[in-house]
Amino acid sequence: MYFQRKAYDELLNWKEKFADRYAVLLEGARRVGKSTIAERFAAQEYRSYILVDFSQASKEEIACFDDIHDIDMFFLRLQAIKGITLYEHESVVIFDEVQLFPKARQAIRHLVKDGRYHYIETGSLISIKKNVKNILIPSEEMKIQIYPMDYEEFCLATGGNFELLGQIYEKKKSVGQQVNRKLMRDMRVYMAVGGMPQAVEAYVNGENFSMIDHIKRQIIKLYEDDFKRLDPSGKLAAIYHSIPAQLSKNAKRYRLSAAVGKRKTSKDENLIYDLMDSKTVLASYNVTDPGAGLPLTKDMGSYKMYISDTGLFVTLMFMDRPTAENEIYAKLLSDKLPANLGYLYENLAAQVIAASGRELFYHTWEKEESTHYYEIDFLISQGAKISALEIKSSGTGKHESISKFKKKYSKRAADCVIFSQKDLDRADGLAYLPLYLLPFFCRQQTAKFN
């Protein structure tokens, strides 16, 4: 089953404007749909294409790269082995899972310079040091980040009306309790299923949530296998698995010692960067002085981590049992799980913000005469100003931090918004928006709720 993906449009733009000068690398975690997008694009937009999948390439295919200094012979051998004719300026070559054969990635420079064909690379763990060791990264390569399916793509796949949500956002008016409840349940379906194409396909095909959960566990197992290859000690997997627990404690930052033990080493710190480079997680950095240039004051030693897919996050929450039963998902969809799930909605918000192409930032500062602190969950640049976002599961309760932020940074703050399950509202100088409108808030450069 093929799903409509935004990356397809990015590839169209690449083909029209850049493909004669750059190869394109589709980068992302495993199972996010990179290979499917690449092959679909090649089949639809070119006269012919050759796919070299380095996860199962034959010895003959690998041997072709011994002739890369003789490009004519390289292409002759490749076409003969694959039984496919390439047409100058009308064909594309796909190097799938290129991280498994760095020599092919290094050859991109010469192939692009030759100018006969276009080139698409796909890769996971592509930024990990061991996968780029001793090779020259080609400057003739541009990247497109492939995320799990975002909420718009999920709605397109499942028949949801995403355009209607956009109209609601533009109106800036409440929709009423009954409609809001229905729209929030739709959003919780996305939260439960997630954006991994295999899980979405199972949902579209009518599989129950136990089966969907099984599929997500298999994806997590693939990640664990990758982690073990990178770090046989098991610490990398432990760091990944500890993310939901650490978020549930509402800690000021991710604590590596809580995952690997008190005697952490510099090698353990490096594992964090390997995990971030794997694209299986999203990192959010604490900024010390919130302003329009958020990256300028980010504290590299103070960060939180989120799971890159909300569906995998839900599965990780229940990894203590063989499979998460349908009953658990039913309670999640009806918002009847007993635990405080603010951290689950926070992870959802992180995924939505990251999918909009934004880097993740948050801000903390100490309370006067107290050991406690204020915290803003997310900061977003809005033109020359910033917007502060607080994420809640219910929409009720205290919101002291964002009120204090609004007062402290009144000259810098564009909007201070509480995203929750509550219908659109405005009170005490704060905007309340339901979480299903977050994609539109991220899309809009200057959002006003007057």
Image (cartoon, rainbow, N blue to C red):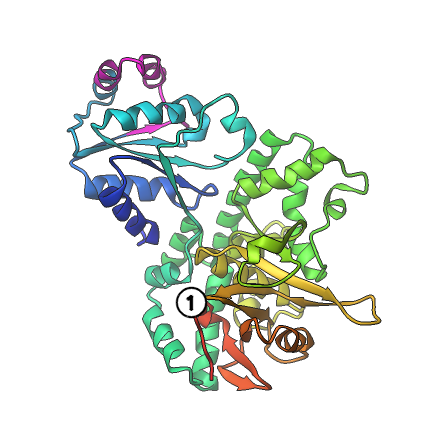
Horizontally, residue 444 falls left or right of residue 348, namely left
Instruction: Tell me the kind of residue under disc 1.
Output: Gln
Which element type, helix, strand or loop, lies under badge 1?
loop
Q: Please provide percent x and percent y for residue 161.
A: 34, 70
Above or below: residue 230 compared with residue 318: above
- Which one is in front, 214 or 350? 350
Asked whether 117 or 122 is in front, the reply is: 117
Q: Which residue is mark 1?
A: 445
Q: Is residue 8 above or below residue 414?
A: above
Tell me: 449 left or right of 319: left
**Residue 279 shown left or right of residue 342 in the figure:** left
Q: Is residue 326 visible?
A: no
> Residue at the spot x=24%, y=24% of the render?
114
184 sits left or right of 225 in the view: left
Residue 13 in the image, given as x and y percentages of width and height:
27, 48
Q: Identify the residue at image location x=61%, y=61%.
A: 362
- Could you say where residue 310 lies in the image, as x and y percent from the top left? 52, 57
**What is the total number of numbered labels drawn onto the structure image?**
1
User: Where on the picture, by quarter, is residue 103?
Assistant: top left
| Residue at 69% in and 63% down | 364
- Where residue 367 sits in the image (x, y, percent)? 77, 70
Write down the region rendered in magenta.
Answer: 51-76
